[in-house]
Amino acid sequence: METKKKVQWISKQEFGGEVIHGMKIGRKLGFPTANVASSSPSLQNGVYGVQVHLNSKKYEGIMNIGFKPTIGSDLKHTIEIHLLNFEGDLYGQHLKCIPLFYIRSEQKFSSLHSLLKQIKEDKEYARVVFRSENIDQNKRIS
C-alpha cells in the first residue's frame, strides 16, 4: 500500500497520562488499545499517527480521540492508542504521546465489521507513513 493522500503533519503536542481500563472493545476486535487518562490535547476528534514513549522505549501507533459513535451515543470523550508491534499489559503505566500526523476524522460506522475494516486501513496507512523514505526525520521524536 502506498500513501494515496498527502500526509497531514501536525505540530507536536506532547501529552501524557496513565493507562486505565476501558470497555475492552479494541481487544475483542483484535486491536487492543491503551485508554489514556489525560486532559484532551488541543486536537480535533479523529485518528492520528503517534509516537509513544514507554519505559525509555519509543513505539509507533494510531490514536483515536473522540466519543466512539459506532459503539454508543452516551460514551464519554476518550483517548485510546493502539501501539504497533507491542504486546503486553499497559494498565497503570504512564505513556508520553506525541501526535505526528492526522489520518481521518471520527465517524460513525454502520457496523463493527465496517469499523474493523477501517481500523485495519488506518493501521496500514500509519505503517506506510512511518516507513516511508520521504518522512522528514525532523517530524519524529528525538
Image (spheres, grey):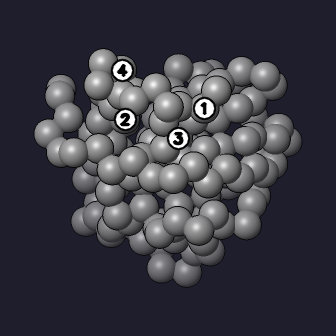
- Name the residue beneath numbered marker 2: 126
CA distance for labels 1 and 3: 10 Å
Compared to residue 89, the image places residue 78 above or below, namely: below
Instruction: Sort mark 4 into few (<14), some (14-19) or many (20+) by Cα contacts within 10 Å.
Output: few
Q: Which residue is mark 3?
A: 50
Q: Nearer the viewer, mark 2 or mark 4?
A: 4
Q: Which mark is residue 141?
A: 1
Q: Earlier in the sequence, mark 1 or mark 2?
A: 2
Q: CA distance from mark 1 to mark 2?
A: 16 Å
- Report x, y in % for residue 90: 75, 34
Question: Which badge, 3 or 4, comes first in the chain's sequence?
Answer: 3
Which picture quadrant has residue 110?
bottom left
Query: From where the camera sits, is residue 91 visible?
Result: no
Q: Which residue is situated farthest in the right direction here?
A: 92
Q: How far is mark 3 from mark 4, CA to CA?
A: 13 Å
Amino acid carrying mark 4 in the image: Arg
Circle 3: residue type: Val
Is residue 34 found left or right of 32 in the rendered image? right
- Say if 82 sits above or below 54 in the image: below
Observer-nearest of 55 and 101: 101
For the residue labelled by badge 4, is the local secondary structure a helix, a strand or a loop?
helix
Which of the marked residues, 2 or 4, is nearer the chain's N terminus? 2
Which quadrant does the C terminus fall into?
top right
- Return the x and y of residue 44 as percentages of the image width and height: 47, 69
Residue located at (75% from left, 30% from top): 54
Label 1 SS? loop
Amino acid type assigned to the residue bearing label 2 in the image = Ala
Pointer 1 or 3: first along the chain:
3
Residue identified by numbered label 4: 131
In the rendered view, would you say 46 is above or below 90? below
Rate crowding at label 1 as few (under 14), some (14 to 19) or many (20 or more) other CA atoms within 10 Å: some
Q: Are marks 1 and 3 in contact (CB under 8 Å)?
A: no
